Amino acid sequence: MARQAGVRYSSPRRQGNLSDLQLYRRLLGYVLSYWYFFAFSLAGYIIYAAGNVLLADLMQFLLDALNESSDADSGIMSGLAYKLFDPQQMDPREFARIAVPLATVSLAFTRAMGFFLGTYFMSHVARHLIHQLRLQLFNTMLAAPSAYYDSHSQGVLISKITFNVEQVTGAATKALTIILRESLSVAGLLAYMLYLNWRLCLVFVAVAPFIALVVTVVGRHFRRYSRRIQASMGDVTQVSNETIGAYRDVRIFGGQQQQYERFAQASEYNRLQSLKLAFADALSTPVIQTLLALALGALVWFALSPGILQGFSAGSLVAFLTAAGQLGKPIRQLSGVQSVIQRGLAAAEDIFTQLDQERERDCGSHRAQRVRGAIRIADLSFAYPGSDAPVLRDICLDIPAGRTVALVGRSGSGKTTLVQLLLRFYNVAEGQILLDDVPIEDYDLANLRSHLAMVSQHVTLFHDTVRNNIAYGALAGATQEQVREAADSAYATAFIEQLPRGFDTVLGDDGGSLSGGQRQRIAIARAILKDAPVLILDEATSALDNESEHRIQRALDNIMRDRTTIVIAHRLSTVERADEIVVMDAGRIVARGDHAALLREGGLYAQLYHQAFAD
Ligand SMILES: Nc1ncnc2c1ncn2[C@@H]1O[C@H](COP(=O)(O)OP(=O)(O)OP(=O)(O)O)[C@@H](O)[C@H]1O
Ligand SMILES: [Mg+2]
């Protein structure tokens, strides 16, 4: 059988591993999947930019009419008007008096329509992009392997979904709109200036490299600060998350000051970096404005030189200067939106890195309707990813279908690890686990897990009703009777009915309002309801009193009868009746047999048992 090596992992904080070009191309890929909206938006902004140019051009119409210049029809709009209406008899001023206001209003109206089209449809694209990114990000979390969660903090992951996606939102909505709209305006105005007088236009264009320099240098700083802001937001979320989750321990152990300092440190770092970003942001716009003013000054100086004035009507000159002056706004906007863009790019970079993370390996295709539940573990050794220390060594274990096997041993001996491997939370690099004689890697992952029900050592409850917590996930279709039956077997009905709304009581975050034993009983009911051929109970009754445990045990006896059961328990009285007891120590199986035989043997089991008895 082909066997792959263990999971490979990139370090959690690896960032900036995508080149800018890859980044842009990937983002563009998202945008292009909504190309029809994008096309509408583009058309809208082209109309808007053209409107801007033509409004500047109207200055020529107005001024040359006032001056009664012979070039009264030399502009774009004036030329068009003269051609269309041919006002031979009319005084140029009279004609302009009618034509210019009409043209102004209709141009402004058209420009406004363009603006609306451009903005609205660009929002369409941007909102889709964000939604899609967020869904994909969430999906990677649903499919990420356990090792991923071991190496990332919860707060940082949450901050990726909330903060980072929001950063892309800013870039996608605001920046994309401004880039498209304003750069089209810049292009239109420059083209118009070129058309009027290309030499003068070159004077203006001469400052472009300086502006580009400012933009690039500032942009690089923006990106660096944005990455740091992002990372610090992760830390802020992490500390808050932890403090909220552990508020009792924080108070009991007097950790307020410590938590406060950690939080303040993360927030302070965030403040500093944000301020640096704001500094660069605030500085770049005035610098660019000054450069533009310089260019405009030079322009006037050249424009008024006699050589240029010749063959340039006063109207055209003013139109030219108006266009040059109008360039200021879009360029300012473009440079001003840089910080948003860079923040978005830094976030996109991080999100893409997340999206590229390995998923839980799921290459098997074997599906079984219902397995018998025979488990065979052969020569299994295992170390957690990123560690060399083996946690399990040379484990060989045969569990025939329908049998109950107990795993006992000291804390940290590898019991939970073994069942996690059975559930394929980690990939086995050495040795094999077979379920019904098929290696578990050959199963389709969802199918494999459908055969296994588990009550884990750390019970998790969802923010939902008790009923939905029992009938969770694939069990959602269960009837009321089935849920109640499962709750009965888990000896949970009595306390559930005491809750304010019975089975319909909504549990708080992770069932915070329930006692430890009540939580366990809900988890047991969930596992019973699943009715899987293999049942794994990892310290499932550890939080219960002896009496409740005894009753559940009796209820479980019925359920265990026709399924394979693996019981892990420290309280050895609960495992006495297992068909076989497997004793583990430091990752190895050191003894096995039934209760009586193991006691006679007098090894670790007898030691643990007598200790419990002595207590
Ligand atoms: N996610 C993990 N990453 C790295 N090491 C781990 C991880 N989970 C557990 N370990 C280590 O593996 C060893 C076995 O842990 P495991 O949880 O299997 O013990 P256990 O027998 O279930 O103990 P207990 O009875 O206390 O539940 C321990 O030394 C533990 O530190
Ligand atoms: Mg354990």
Image (tube, grey):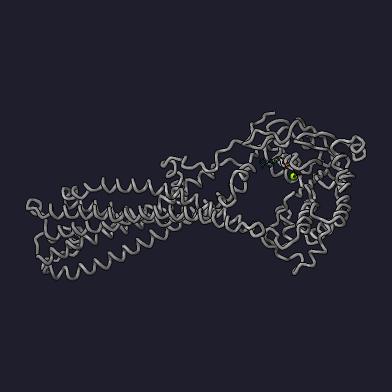
The residue positioned 84% from the left and 45% from the top of the image is 563
103 or 141, which is in the foreground? 141
The image quadrant that residue 577 belongs to is top right
Q: Is residue 456 above or below residue 367?
A: below
Residue 40 visible in the displayed image = no
Q: Is residue 193 above or below residue 442?
A: below
73 or 194, which is in the foreground? 194
Q: Position of residue 393 (x, y in %)?
A: 74, 32
Q: Position of residue 254 (x, y in %)?
A: 63, 58
Q: Position of residue 164 (x, y in %)?
A: 50, 52
310 or 462, which is in the foreground? 462
Residue 92 visible in the displayed image = yes
Q: Is residue 370 above or below residue 513?
A: above
Q: Quadrant of the N terminus?
A: top right
Q: Position of residue 587 (x, y in %)?
A: 75, 35
The residue positioned 7% from the left and 50% from the top of the image is 307
**How many numbered discs sit on the rendered protein?**
0
Q: Is residue 269 left or right of residue 533?
A: left
Quarter of the rendered image showing ligand 2: top right
Q: Is residue 575 left or right of residue 438?
A: right
Q: Is residue 73 left or right of residue 3?
A: left
Q: Is residue 66 above or below residue 548?
A: below
The residue positioned 12% from the left and 60% from the top of the image is 314
292 or 132, which is in the foreground? 292
